[in-house]
Structure formats: C-alpha cells, structure tokens
Image (tube, helix red, strand yellow):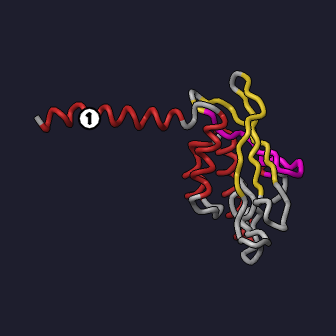
Amino acid sequence: MPQLKHKFLLPIALLILSASAFSQRSTPKLALESFYKFDRSHSQVFNRRNIEERKAWLSPELYSLFKNELRREADFLKQNPTDKPFFGDGLPFRPYDELCDGPKKSGRSLTIGLKFQKARRAAATATFAYPRSCKTADTIVYTISLIKVNSKWVIDDIDFDKDTRLKHSLNRPEY
C-alpha cells in the first residue's frame, strides 16, 4: 500500500510544482516578480555564474549581449588590471542597496506595475522607493521591456530612470 501511495503522490507533487513554476511567468508582472525575488536574494557581482543564474529570465538577445560584455570586460581587465570595469558596481537590474536616512534604517521597497501588454510584447515598471519616514526621497523607476519567448515572459531591455537603455549600454562601441 505505501508503494501505491508514492506512485500517485509523486506525479501529483510534480504537477503542482510545475504548475506553480509556470504560473510565476505566465504574465509579464508575475515574471518580473519572480525575477526580482530571485535577484534580491542572490549575489550582484557581474560574472558568468550570476548571468547564467538569471538566464531563464533574459531574452536570447539580452543574454547574448551579457555574454559578449563578459568577454569585453575580460579583455579590458587584461589591459587595465587596476581600473574598474563598466559593470564594476554589479548587475544592472536594480539600484545600489543603500539604507535611507531616517528614524529607522531601511532599504528601498520594490513595486512592479504593468504598463501595457500586447500579443508578445509588454512593458512594466519597477519602482524602487524608500518608506515615507526616510529623509531620502529619491524614488527610482525602471521601465522594463518584456517579450514572450515560447510560453514565458522574459526581460528584453531596461530603460533606466535617466533615459539610458541597458541594450544601448551593452552595445556601446568602445569599452
């Protein structure tokens, strides 16, 4: 009887887990929430391992640009070993982790909002804001372009608060 239970429980458990994983990326907003949940709990160092960990959330083109950037960085550091590389401050998916000045030291919260969704393209905002009790009031908003690849939404580009796009930075002619 215990073996019979395992034969039925294992497929059911796998089905529930796969449905949960699918639902996390079935809309652009859920895809970004899933990405940022992962991103906030993992290393921000710009290296191959950390890019690979985020590959499932990146469009094929963006992933390719990151791989190219890693090669460019390696070449740059060979010639300039004491200089800071372009992404020396870490991965570009969120602002620096800084605590606010206020009665209680706290970091920025994240709010994801959907701007539009049409067929296989979408745009969403990632708003990074301090609590109202902080004296620091700078809210940072990234506009994130997403595309649908197969059946999941992935990040295709990021427009940073100052009209600088991630793909443009990765495609810059000179290092």
Residue 158 drawn in magenta: yes
Q: Quadrant of residue 96?
A: bottom right
Task: Identify the residue shown where x is 69% and y is 43%.
Answer: 62
Q: Residue furthest top?
A: 119
Q: Is residue 75 magenta?
A: no
Q: Residue furthest bottom?
A: 82
Which residue corresponds to the image point at 75% horizontal and 67% vertical from the top-left? 85
Residue type for callout 1: Leu
> In x, y percent, where is residue 136?
84, 66
> Is 88 situated above or below 168?
below
**Residue 117 drawn at (x, y percent):** 73, 27
Whole-percent x, y for residue 9 in the image = 26, 35
Q: Quadrant of residue 125?
A: top right
Residue annotated with mark 1? 9
Total labels: the figure holds 1
Q: Which residues are magenta?
A: 153-169
Residue at 55% in and 52% down: 53
